[in-house]
Image (spheres, grey):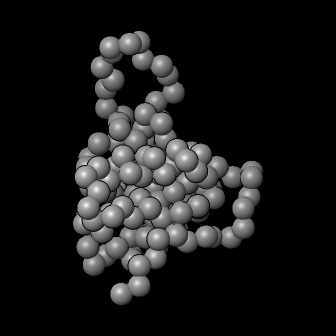
Amino acid sequence: MMKMQAIEVDGPRSDMPKAVGFVRPDVSGLAAPRHVTAVIDHAQARGYQYIYTVRPPHDTSDPIGYVLGIAAGLDVEAIVVYDLAHEDNQPARICEDFDLETVCPATTWARARFQSPPGAVVGAAAPLL
């Protein structure tokens, strides 16, 4: 089985916001190739320049932290997942720094655009309707 870590789609376009996909093999299982395709299609349909498909190694203790580090390094606007199971049903964790796009259901979870006071508890992210 061929492991595809990155897919470059089209050439770089500076006028489009960038996004990475996040597909966890432990969540997608045999549907992983289909989920990757759906994530890419969703990102492009939403107007993102798709940069990379992140597939964390099996021995990663924090797969969400893994994708957050890569996304920050690539300076993307959004992380695209197939469904909320890929980020352990914790959209708020991703939305602290990035927009979150889900394929199923097709939803945009906007990043938190405010600074919390020190020690404040931040609530869960809410989808844009």
Q: Residue at x 45, y 55 (%)?
A: 80
117 shown above or below 77: above
Please name the residue shown 36% across and 61% down the image: 56
Q: Position of residue 91 (x, y in %)?
A: 34, 42
Instruction: Measuring from the top left, give residue 108's x and y in whole percent.
Output: 46, 46
Query: Given the current orientation, which residue lies at the most extreme bottom position?
Result: 1
Q: Which residue is at 27% across, 65% downward?
A: 58
Left or right: residue 90 versus residue 113 is left
- Image coordinates for residue 1, horizontal then vertical, percent: 36, 87
| Above or below: residue 117 compared with residue 71 | above
Which residue occupies 55% across, 54% down?
19
Tell me if I can see residue 128 in this picture: no
Report the quarter where the C terminus lies: top left
Left or right placement of residue 43 versus residue 109 in this view: right
Quadrant for residue 47, please give it.
bottom right
Residue 33 position within the rendered picture, expressed as x and y whole percent measured from the top left: 39, 77
